[in-house]
Image (cartoon, grey):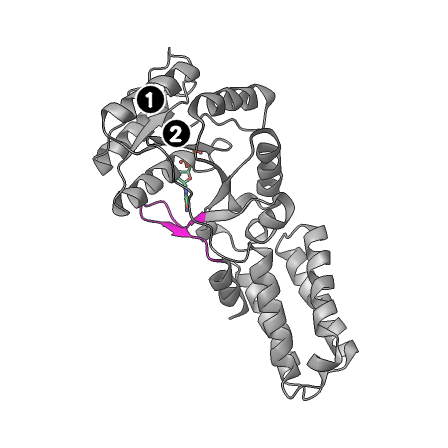
Amino acid sequence: MFDNLSGKLQKVFKHLRGQGKLTEENIQEALREVRLALLEADVHYKVARDFVKGIAERAVGREVMQSLTPGQQVIKIVNDALTDLMGGSAEPLRLAGKPPLAVMLVGLQGSGKTTTAGKLALRLSRDKRRPCLVPVDVYRPAAIDQLKTLAGQLGLPVYPSKTDQRPEDIAREALAFASREGCDTLLVDTAGRLHVDDELMAELERLKKILSPAEILLVADAMTGQDAVQVASSFNERLGVSGVVLTKLDGDARGGAALSIRAVTGCPIKFVGVGEKLDALEVFHPDRMSSRILG
Ligand code: GDP
């Protein structure tokens, strides 16, 4: 991930570091290249523009340019700015309140919702919580079976949803089921569509009312770049998204969604998916990601 961007930025900064003193022109030239590298990484153009503008304001000043290591200072400014761009610090799940707490997973079909539900269930079990799962996608029997299989692998309870139930009834009954099973967290795998559509959003709004979820996590496929950012915006406008799980970062060489989603939508990335296996879910640390990009 971030291979191209990383290579490009490292080249720009190697050049800067090689110069004893920096002129304003040196810095502006480097920032032009940073902006191009961001655009090539599929970062939203407004995000790239504002990012570079913010750095220019901090880097083109007497303090930086007359310091003994101006190149190093500019790199630090870029590192801090990249970290801020991605949200500053890691955002944990907020799971305080009276159990069972619902966590809704929403997103388009194929984004990785069901897999992520399994991954989160594993993580929560390891954190000494007791999660259970519920599939709400009554339109796709295969999706229900997939979640049941995952729950079986994890040895966790799963509410036995049926395709002839209404999603709202499933939600109500699954909450009661979670209480009966002594579970503190109910992971709700909602239906997805190929595109954002009104009917689905209306269903998700009704589920939100019933479940009063502690978290609404939007699951988005990093490989779809700016589309993932658009999808996040749409879901956030209708539902209010408390966090993003960006999946398939292992297959995303560019990284545009990871760099833009927070700035465009205001929603923090809480986790990233880095593989198909159930343990391939990492907490998203903006500072570590930034250092990784800058090498
Ligand atoms: P859903 O339709 O949103 O429930 O999506 P699924 O959970 O069924 O995932 C769709 C495909 O993406 C499956 O083949 C998953 O194995 C795969 N997948 C999900 N998350 C990741 C990830 O982080 N990395 C990779 N490489 N594949 C993933």
Place of residue 186 in the rendered image (x, y in percent of width and height, measured from the top left): 34, 31
Label 1 with label 2: CB-CB less than 8 Å: yes
What secondary structure do most residues of the magenta stretch adopt? loop
In terms of secondary structure, where does tag 2 sit? Answer: strand
Name the kind of residue labelled 2 in the image: Val
Question: Could you tell whether 259 is left or right of 155 in the image?
Answer: right
In this view, which residue lies farthest toward the left?
A: 155
Q: Which of marks 1 and 2 is nearer the N terminus?
A: 1
Please determine whether, in this image, residue 259 is positioned above or below residue 267.
below
Q: In which quarter of the image is ligand 1?
A: top left
The residue sitting at 53% across, 63% down in the picture is: 290
Residue at the spot of label 2:
188
Q: Nearer the viewer, residue 162 or 253?
A: 162
Helix, strand or loop at disc 1?
helix
Q: What residue type is labelled 1?
A: Ala
Residue at position x 47%, y 54% in the image: 90
In the depicted structure, whether residue 151 falls above or below residue 5: above
Q: Is residue 54 magenta?
A: no
The magenta segment: 271-285
Picture coordinates of residue 211, whole percent (x, y): 42, 25
How far from the left and from the top, in percent, is residue 262? 58, 49
- Residue 278 quadrant: top left
Q: Seen in the image, is 229 located left or right of residue 247? A: right
Q: Is residue 222 visible?
A: yes
Relative to residue 132, is residue 270 drawn left or right? Answer: right
Frontmost residue, 165 versus 60: 60
Is residue 8 in view from this perspective?
no
- As measured in the structure, the alpha-carbon distance from the residue carrying label 1 to the one carrying label 2 is 9 Å
- Pinpoint residue 185: horizontal percent, then vertical percent: 33, 34
Residue of label 1: 174
The residue that appears at 46% across and 57% down in the rendered structure is 285
